[in-house]
Image: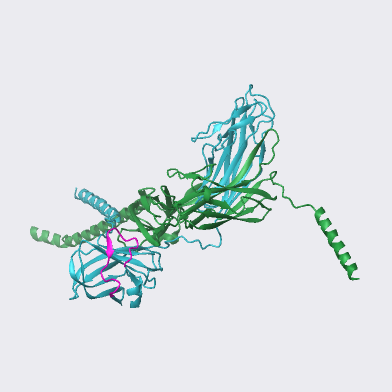
């Protein structure tokens, strides 16, 4: 009896221990919160890592004071702060409104204050105390890119602070700000290989021969479109048909194109009038995924889509292409009453382009 | 003597002139019988121009076919569908900017294997708008002849052209309308992030930035810094565009493989060198994207959380842990039992002394 009890308690203990260990694995999560910088705002004009930058400091004091003697801005750890005071004062400070936040007003005496640098902190001192009130957002810009460089590592949150002090060196107000550093902030074309797009149509004609009610006539040698491109955003091929079918001038008659259906291809069948263009695709390489429009996808005999007089997308790709080949197969069918003529024809226009 | 030389020279020149006149003038027949093969660069064509001044853009066209091509270039309008991401090409000239576009050679001939430099001049008036987007289509000047019953297939190449106008009032503004992961819970990486940007300004914008994958928002060091809009896509005013970014740096991780038939499939790859990258628990992705507005970076942020739960691996660990615990407990029980028995054996009176006592009792 006692042995049974021991066994039970042992099993309970094991299950509890396992449960605790399992839950511990997932107890790593924490509640996230977004940084809010309503009172202090330090904007770096460039956020790319290791990049010299100009910028803007704005602050709305929480306490009105007539004795603002100095203020300091501490730049985030890792940012390279110039120790040359001249980079931080007079001609290198401006109070021109450079897309300041709404309500931004010139920081009092910002262009006259003298700067001193200690570590990550730049302190500006007024020759005489200034007045700053808690209803105004004060701003100024540092305009020398020699003053500070962004840290060398990318991070979502680099913390710094802005502090105002009075004549007794007591802190009036202080607040933290956060900024990010990113690996690249501007897309500059420096490559020696420019974006290029190459489009080749294998031939300009397609003969369907003599049409018959007994079978569907398909292109004997389907024409191909070959695309080669380094366009990273992909590419498109569109098509349109001047006659929306095969037209005979002598018979004044058009074998109508099938009606395009985005859901899937239509099928031309023997003994019925119909005309469509089927597309298949292959690709040797490239980063893009090549997709033929479902309405034109040729998965079997006589399958395809009907083109109209407006351009319709035949195929798209999401990236670059190395010998992407679209094969165009035209299918036509007639019925017994289709007028006889030897000049049934039409003109298909295909256009290719690399996406922006 | 002098006159003789002069006469001889004149006669030679006359003869050469007559010969030159009789030589055929080089004319280039269309390569209409053969295929159509053009290469264009750059594609797309992007520029920022000032109104009231002439701006010149250069487009290079190469004839890759075996015959000369007589070509023409024309501006055409297009529209972009934000929902499907599809571009609809139109056969009409872009109404707003067409009168201000001119070409160095609207019709031109390119020999086989040769490049042609087309100069496009944009002469925007001061009253021009803030941005324009259109396509330049290059096609043959004349269609090839077809015989009865043949279908003509025309080839053409389009180059998207995006023009921002640098003028007062130009406003670049982007918003992130959606920042999400393809799933809320993953068993293994990759995780795919989608960032949907909306251009609410009046100029063409190109965002860039990073997605920082962290344990939580305040983590000092991210697990990964992923590039946003790495393909350098442009977002037209009033449109939306989704860019995707993948975080695949994990153990194990699915990798796309190409099958023999050309299709792709996902295969779980166990790269033991990445054992330290076993991803487990909740992660936070912090988006910091920037766009350029009047020379400075404007950040836009977003946050999304997701879970990675490699439940099969965890289940395996759980089973092993339970088995180990069971084995340890069994061992401890056996040891305890053994010690108790030994202890009990020590406490039990010796049979010899017991019989002596009995003897004493009975005595």
Nearer-the-camera pick, B4 or A111:
B4
Relative side of B218 to B85, left or right: left
**Chain painted cyan:** A
Q: How many marks?
A: 0
- Residue A180 falls in which quadrant of the image? bottom left
Relative side of A296 to B175, left or right: right
On the image, the x and y values in percent for residue A278 come to: 58, 37
Q: Is residue B149 above or below residue B65?
A: above
Q: Is residue A118 above or below residue A339?
A: below
Residues in magenta, as a range: A95-113
On the image, the x and y values in percent for residue B37 come to: 64, 49
- Residue B34 falls in which quadrant of the image? top right
Per the rendering, the colour in which chain B appears is green
On the image, the x and y values in percent for residue B214 come to: 34, 59
Nearer-the-camera pick, A241 or A271:
A241
Q: Is residue A104 on the magenta stretch?
A: yes
Quick check: can you spot residue B258? no
Quick check: can you spot residue B10? yes
Most prominent secondary structure in the magenta stretch?
Answer: loop
Q: Is residue B316 on the magenta stretch?
A: no
Q: Is residue B219 above or below residue B312?
A: below
Residue at x 23%, y 50% (from the top left corner): A12
On the image, the x and y values in percent for residue A310 come to: 54, 38
Residue at x 52%, y 57% (from the top left corner): B54
């Amino acid at each position: 009896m006692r042995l049974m009890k021991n066994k039970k308690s042992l099993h309970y203990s094991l299950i509890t221990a396992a449960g605790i260990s399992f839950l511990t694995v997932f107890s790593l999560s924490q509640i996230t919160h977004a940084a809010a910088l309503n009172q202090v705002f330090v904007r770096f004009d460039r956020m790319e890592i290791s990049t010299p930058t100009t910028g803007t400091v704005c602050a709305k004091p929480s306490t009105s004071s007539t004795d603002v003697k100095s203020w300091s801005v501490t730049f985030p750890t890792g940012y390279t702060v110039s120790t040359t005071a001249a980079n931080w004062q007079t001609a290198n400070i401006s109070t021109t409104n450079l897309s300041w936040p709404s309500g931004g007003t010139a920081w009092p005496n910002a262009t006259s204050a003298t700067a001193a640098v200690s570590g990550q902190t730049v302190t500006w001192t007024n020759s005489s105390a200034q007045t700053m009130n808690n209803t105004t957002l004060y701003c100024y810009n540092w305009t020398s890119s020699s003053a500070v460089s962004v840290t060398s590592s990318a991070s979502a949150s680099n913390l710094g602070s802005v502090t105002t002090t009075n004549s007794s060196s007591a802190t009036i107000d202080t607040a933290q700000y956060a900024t990010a550093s990113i690996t690249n902030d501007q897309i500059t074309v420096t490559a020696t290989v420019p974006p290029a797009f190459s489009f080749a149509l294998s031939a300009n004609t397609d003969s369907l021969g003599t049409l018959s009610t007994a079978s569907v006539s398909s292109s004997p040698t389907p024409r191909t479109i070959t695309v080669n491109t380094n366009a990273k955003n992909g590419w498109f091929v569109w098509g349109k048909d001047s006659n929306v079918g095969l037209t005979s001038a002598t018979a004044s008659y058009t074998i109508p194109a099938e009606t395009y259906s985005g859901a899937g291809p239509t099928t031309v069948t023997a003994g019925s009038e119909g005309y469509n263009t089927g597309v298949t695709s292959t690709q040797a390489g490239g980063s893009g995924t090549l997709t033929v429009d479902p309405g034109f996808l040729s998965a079997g005999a006589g399958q395809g889509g009907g083109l109209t007089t407006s351009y319709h997308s035949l195929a798209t790709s999401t990236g670059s292409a190395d010998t992407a080949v679209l094969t165009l197969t035209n299918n036509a069918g007639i019925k017994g009453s289709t007028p006889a003529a030897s000049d049934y024809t039409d003109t298909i226009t295909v256009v290719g382009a690399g996406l922006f | 003597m002098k006159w003789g030389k002069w006469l001889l020279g004149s006669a030679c020149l006359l003869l050469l002139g007559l010969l030159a006149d009789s030589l055929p003038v080089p004319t280039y027949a269309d390569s209409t019988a053969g295929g159509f093969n053009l290469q264009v660069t750059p594609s797309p064509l992007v520029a920022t121009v000032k109104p009231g001044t002439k701006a010149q853009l250069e487009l290079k066209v190469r004839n890759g076919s075996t015959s000369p091509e007589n070509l023409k270039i024309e501006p055409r309008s297009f529209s972009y569908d934000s929902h499907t991401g599809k571009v609809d090409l139109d056969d009409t000239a872009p109404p707003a900017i067409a009168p201000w576009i001119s070409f160095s050679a609207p019709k031109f001939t390119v020999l086989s294997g040769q490049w042609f430099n087309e100069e496009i001049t944009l002469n925007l008036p001061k009253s021009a708008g803030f941005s324009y987007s259109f396509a330049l289509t290059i096609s043959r000047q004349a269609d090839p002849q077809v015989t009865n019953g043949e279908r003509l297939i025309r080839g053409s190449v389009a180059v998207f052209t995006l023009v921002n106008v640098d003028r007062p009032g130009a406003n670049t503004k982007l918003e992130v309308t959606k920042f999400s992961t393809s799933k809320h819970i993953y068993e293994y990486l990759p995780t795919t992030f989608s960032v949907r940007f909306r251009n609410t300004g009046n100029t063409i914008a190109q965002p860039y930035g990073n997605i920082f994958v962290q344990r939580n928002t305040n983590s000092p060091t991210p697990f990964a810094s992923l590039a946003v809009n790495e393909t350098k896509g442009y977002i037209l005013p009033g449109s939306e565009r989704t860019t995707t970014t993948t975080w695949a740096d994990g153990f194990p991780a699915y990798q796309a493989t190409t099958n023999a038939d050309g299709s792709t499939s996902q295969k779980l790859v166990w790269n033991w060198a990445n054992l330290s990258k076993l991803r487990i628990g909740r992660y936070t992705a912090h988006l910091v994207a920037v766009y350029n507005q009047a020379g400075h970076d404007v950040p836009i942020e977003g946050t999304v959380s997701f879970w990675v739960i490699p439940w099969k691996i965890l289940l395996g660990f759980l089973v092993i842990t339970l088995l180990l615990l069971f084995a340890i407990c069994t061992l401890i029980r056996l040891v305890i039992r053994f010690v108790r028995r030994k202890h009990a054996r020590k406490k039990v009176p010796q049979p010899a002394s017991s019989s002596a006592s009995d003897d004493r009792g009975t005595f």
